[in-house]
Image (cartoon, grey):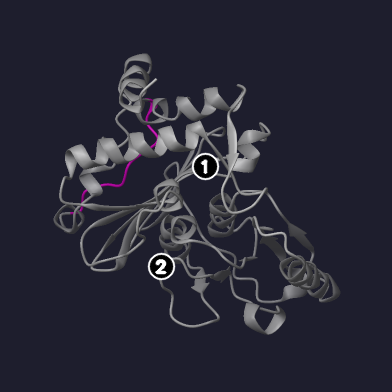
Amino acid sequence: MKKAKLLSRLRGRWPGTGWAVSLEEAATVRSMKRGHRMPRATPAYSLKFRIIRKALTEEKRVSTKTSAADLVTETDHLVEDLIISELRTRFPSHRFIAEESAASGAKCVLTASPTWIIDPIDGTCNFVHRFPTVAVSIGFAVNQELEFGVIYHCTEERLYTGRCGRGAFCNGQRLRASKETDLSKALVLTEIGPKRDPATLKLFLSNMERLLHAKAHGVRVIGSSTLALCHLAAGAADAYYQFGLHCWDLAAATVIIREAGGIVMDTSGPIRTGEPERTSGGWNVPETLQH
């Protein structure tokens, strides 16, 4: 079946599957300056994510990208196409940076133009195995500066939002990052990533060992970097680190964490599109980890 016909059928099957409707009032600098509200987790908004929730329980066609652990499904592509299609209809002059488009060869360049940065399904490996930690992440940048971010936990129906100068929220409840600065009292989150070469595995395992020798309370891997970062913003964890994150992993979460009072840093230099970052509530990540 052609992609356009399948998207049309999806819209018919789930009435109101317009991903951009709840984002529209927050999508321009003018509207943000006028104080329009961020999207809320209304029933109509949640309805748009039934595609992922339904597909989570079904058999999937799975293929790989950069490695045997870097998975993608037809649902990743469909959701990304649907998001971009709806947003482009409303904002024809805006640009897009999206994970699966980039994997297919689209250039990943952040310009001064209003730009949507999209991860259609974060936690694809979880999604493939029906493990319910799965999210959609949408960030928005203007003049190469992030303005707001939205992350939706598809199975728990939690909508995380952040907007520069306006705070960070989960389903309307204010988020505040941990103020813990003592690693021996910290819960640390991380992700393994898709690379499995000996050097990467050695680095990952040695850093785990360093954290445990430093007597961190614990180290957790949940399979979704965006949701791990949301846990950080909510104060449920004290730090997160990962090497090789992409802009679609970080765009929305960066705004949410900063607005919750957390810190986002790149130990190799200024934060740029697609470069690795680490995040923390307060303790010094670069001094603790090898990189």
Instruction: Give the mark nearer the N terminus: 2 vs 1.
Output: 1
**Residue at 26% across, 47% down:** 37
Tell me the element at label 2: loop
Residue 231: % across, % down: 59, 53
Q: How many marks?
A: 2
Type of amino acid under label 1: Ala
**What is the three-letter code of the residue carrying label 2?**
Thr
Q: Nearer the viewer, residue 69 or 216?
A: 69
Q: Secondary structure at mark 1?
A: strand
Q: What span is colored magenta in the figure? A: 35-43
* Residue receiving disc 1: 135
**Residue 181 spot, x, y in % from top left:** 65, 76
Residue at 48%, 70% (x, y): give it: 275
Residue neighbourhood size for the residue with mark 2, other residues' Cα within 10 Å, grouped as few (<14), some (14–19), many (≥20):
some
Residue under numbered circle 2: 273
Is 33 on the left or on the right of 99, as rendered?
left
